[in-house]
Image (cartoon, rainbow, N blue to C red):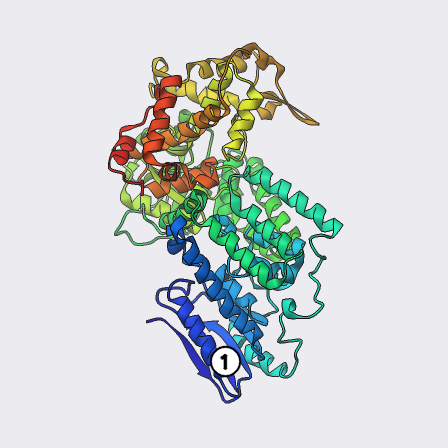
């Protein structure tokens, strides 16, 4: 059984070492009785000088029991409220003890773990690269319910606490100290001795052992929420939150509300209770369940290798070659160098290769300027990238990534010229977003060692890597590609070889549906704005301008020429005709040329007046139909990818849709959206849309089967 080990030394200092069942300490059903029992002992302990809270795990404390929280429904809210209030009562008993409590943070202290630290008088963290401190609940649709919102607002003030509460920012020990989250950083071996030293140094010092919120006359840094400057700050934060969430993610707004009330008229005890009420109100919501399911459990499944072929030992790339130093190649080179890999970056000229290296130099310079690394560290990273125009320099790489133009003949030529330079047993990766890997691998001497590696732009910011298995790609190659993705800190999903794979195929459906709406005569600004109201990061017409109309038309034409698409079966013929005309007759290529659905100039963007040619004032459609047509197209395409085996798992689909193609975060990903929408209800809505707008909205067989069995997608 798990335990809180209780040890009192000769100086009257008690060390409580949290060692619960499982790999981490967590606020689960086992926690509260252990916590309460420890406090019962402390309150009757004679000669007590102070208490050190630490952990027997690699992490200090991992936070709340997300499996339990995800299971809460409306009937379970009161029990959860009572449980959270009971835990907070024990925390208040800690704070009111007439002896100092110290959090000796030996690893990550996140969420509920950091809330325990906040209830201590002093917080000391080990100088450990694995130590992360913060309150990331908002990233999972929750809020810190163990006093974290109230206490951090009291300690840092409204402005100081906002990044940690509203964004869920996590930081290492030194940054945590600089921000005021902790008091000290020491070497790991000095953690417990320093905690004891501090306890003994403050004996009899009432100020040191009284929490700020229990100190008479204490003023919150920056003043109360009713101060004019803070009222402006709160209004600005509320506006920014709505702009970011469209009101679809309630947690950030509830956090801001608690912060405002905590720094306003509510006393500390009432603020804690108010925080609990707001916390438990989130748990039955579909948004919360979606985000927990995908951004925690799904992410852990994907990164943990659920789709990685089994029985193949882990591997590491020792030397990476990249062919093509353009936008994608230079981004891959930077990401790999940041992960410690030596990289040979080759282009047709040395100047081009050096420009690719200079891209990395620019990003590193920004990191130095922001204080994220030293100049020496930046120089070390840059030194790992070797620019060249000499093919011989690629020789001996155990992975070569081809990142040249999205043209088959160019990719074929590069493969023929460089494949033999791979190290013995090395493998080849083609960075492509649409071209079939089986076709690209047909010219390879070893197609079993050929894999698709679809990076997303900009590579240094986008966390997803889509790994594509061709017909002959071996499981060993897939496993090595997966390991490489984790090595360079990307989240990998493994998908089957299909036109557009999973991500390009799915993102294309929602974009083309938005164009179809405009081609039908609807107001383009309304269509663009309503697509954002679904929770997508940007409007679909704006996104198409970024992607480039020219590129979309070229890819479609190429796929038709290759026989991969039949224009007679095109599901959005009006949209295709409109795009062809915009590009061909009007020269509207996209944002890069300043001309797309919008005109782009020094003062911003305005809708292209030429779209009036398609406008039909008599065309009628509800706002909900516009939003559902755009969102449902992507959801249905994801289900078809799962049905066809393009997706290997539901988790891959959900994680990939959020990290790679802008699925609304509150949905938990395109497939999870169906679960909380309700399978029968989703089928019925699809049938409505299909009857009005076409067969592309018809429910696929996999959806009908799951609905008939009342079986969620998992």
Horizontal and vertical percent for residue 449? 31, 40
- In this view, the residue in front, 27 or 476, is 27
Look at the image and tell me in which quarter the C terminus lies: top left
Look at the image and tell me in which quarter the N terminus lies: bottom left
Q: What residue is drawn where x is 56% and y is 27%? A: 529
Horizontal and vertical percent for residue 713? 31, 40
- In this view, the residue in front, 324 or 256, is 256
- In this view, the residue in front, 404 or 73, is 73
Figure check: 146 above or below 525: below
Q: What residue is drawn where x is 71% and y is 46%? A: 232
Label 1: state its secondary structure: helix
Q: Is residue 471 left or right of residue 386?
A: left
Q: Is residue 62 left or right of residue 616?
A: left
Query: Does any portion of residue 391 appear in the rendered image?
Result: no
Which residue in the structure is indicated by mark 1? Answer: 43
Figure check: 89 above or below 670: below
Query: Does any portion of residue 464 appear in the rendered image?
Result: yes
Is disc 1 surrounded by few (<14), some (14 to 19) or many (20+) residues within 10 Å? few
Figure check: 555 above or below 72: above
């Amino acid at each position: 059984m798990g335990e809180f080990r209780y040890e009192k030394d000769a100086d009257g200092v008690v060390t409580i070492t949290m060692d619960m069942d499982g790999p981490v300490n967590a606020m689960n059903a086992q926690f509260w009785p252990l916590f309460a029992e420890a406090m019962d002992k402390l309150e009757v302990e004679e000669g007590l000088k102070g208490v050190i809270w630490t952990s027997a795990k690699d992490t200090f404390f991992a936070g709340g029991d997300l499996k339990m929280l995800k299971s809460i429904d409306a009937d379970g809210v009161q029990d959860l409220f009572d449980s959270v209030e009971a835990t907070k009562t024990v925390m208040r008993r800690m704070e009111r003890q007439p002896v100092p409590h110290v959090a000796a943070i030996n690893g990550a202290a996140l969420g509920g773990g950091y809330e325990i630290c906040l209830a201590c008088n002093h917080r000391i963290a080990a100088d450990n690269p694995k130590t992360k401190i913060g309150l990331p609940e908002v990233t999972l649709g929750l809020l810190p319910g163990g006093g974290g919102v109230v206490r951090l607002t009291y300690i840092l003030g409204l402005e100081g606490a906002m990044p940690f509460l509203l964004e869920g920012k996590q930081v290492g020990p030194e940054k945590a100290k600089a921000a005021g989250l902790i008091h000290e950083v020491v070497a790991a071996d000095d953690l417990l001795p320093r905690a004891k030293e501090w306890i003994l140094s403050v004996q009899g010092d009432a100020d040191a052992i009284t929490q700020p919120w229990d100190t008479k006359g204490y003023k919150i840094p920056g003043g109360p929420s009713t101060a004019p400057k803070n009222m402006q700050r709160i209004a600005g934060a509320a506006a920014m939150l709505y702009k970011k969430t469209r009101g679809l993610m309630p947690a950030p707004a509830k956090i801001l509300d608690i912060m405002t009330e905590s720094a306003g008229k509510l006393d500390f005890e009432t603020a804690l209770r108010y925080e609990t009420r707001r916390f438990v109100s989130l748990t039955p919501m579909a948004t919360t369940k979606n985000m927990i399911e995908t951004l925690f459990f799904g992410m852990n499944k994907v990164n943990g290798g659920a789709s990685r072929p089994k029985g193949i030992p882990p591997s590491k790339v020792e030397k990476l070659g990249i062919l093509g130093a353009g936008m994608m190649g230079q981004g891959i080179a930077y990401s790999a160098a940041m992960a410690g890999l030596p990289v040979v970056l080759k282009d047709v000229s040395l100047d081009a290769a050096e420009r690719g290296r200079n891209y990395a130099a620019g990003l590193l310079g920004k990191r130095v300027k922001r204080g994220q690394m030293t100049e020496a560290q930046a120089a070390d990273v840059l030194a790992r990238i070797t620019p060249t125009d000499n093919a011989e320099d690629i020789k001996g790489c155990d992975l070569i990534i081809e990142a040249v133009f999205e043209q088959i003949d160019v990719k074929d030529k590069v493969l023929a010229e460089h494949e033999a330079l791979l190290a013995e047993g090395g493998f080849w990766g083609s960075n492509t977003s649409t071209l079939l890997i089986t076709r690209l691998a047909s010219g390879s001497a070893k197609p079993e060692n050929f894999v698709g590696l679809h990076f997303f732009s900009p590579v240094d910011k986008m966390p997803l890597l889509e790994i594509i298995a061709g017909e002959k790609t071996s499981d060993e190659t897939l496993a090595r590609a997966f390991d490489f993705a984790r090595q360079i800190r990307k989240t990998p999903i493994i998908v089957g070889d299909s036109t557009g794979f999973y991500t390009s195929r799915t993102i294309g459906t929602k974009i083309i549906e938005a164009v179809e709406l405009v081609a039908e005569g609807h107001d383009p600004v309304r269509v663009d704005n309503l697509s954002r109201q679904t929770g997508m990061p940007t409007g679909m017409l704006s996104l198409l301008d970024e992607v480039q109309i020219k590129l979309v038309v070229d890819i479609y034409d190429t796929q038709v020429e290759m026989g991969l698409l039949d224009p007679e079966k095109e599901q959005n013929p009006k949209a295709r005709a409109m795009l062809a005309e915009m590009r061909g007759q009007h020269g509207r290529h996209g944002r890069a040329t300043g001309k797309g659905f919008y005109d782009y100039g020094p003062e911003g963007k305005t809708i292209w007046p030429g779209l009036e040619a398609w406008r039909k004032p008599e065309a009628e459609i509800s706002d909900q139909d516009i939003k559902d047509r755009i969102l449902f197209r992507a959801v249905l395409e994801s289900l078809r990818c799962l049905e066809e085996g393009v997706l290997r798992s539901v988790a891959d689909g959900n994680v990939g849709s959020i990290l790679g193609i802008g699925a609304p975060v509150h949905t938990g990903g395109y497939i999870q959206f169906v679960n909380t929408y309700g399978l029968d209800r989703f089928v019925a809505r699809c049938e409505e849309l299909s009857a009005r707008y076409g067969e592309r909205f018809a429910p696929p067989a996999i959806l009908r089967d799951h609905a008939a069995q009342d079986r969620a997608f998992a």
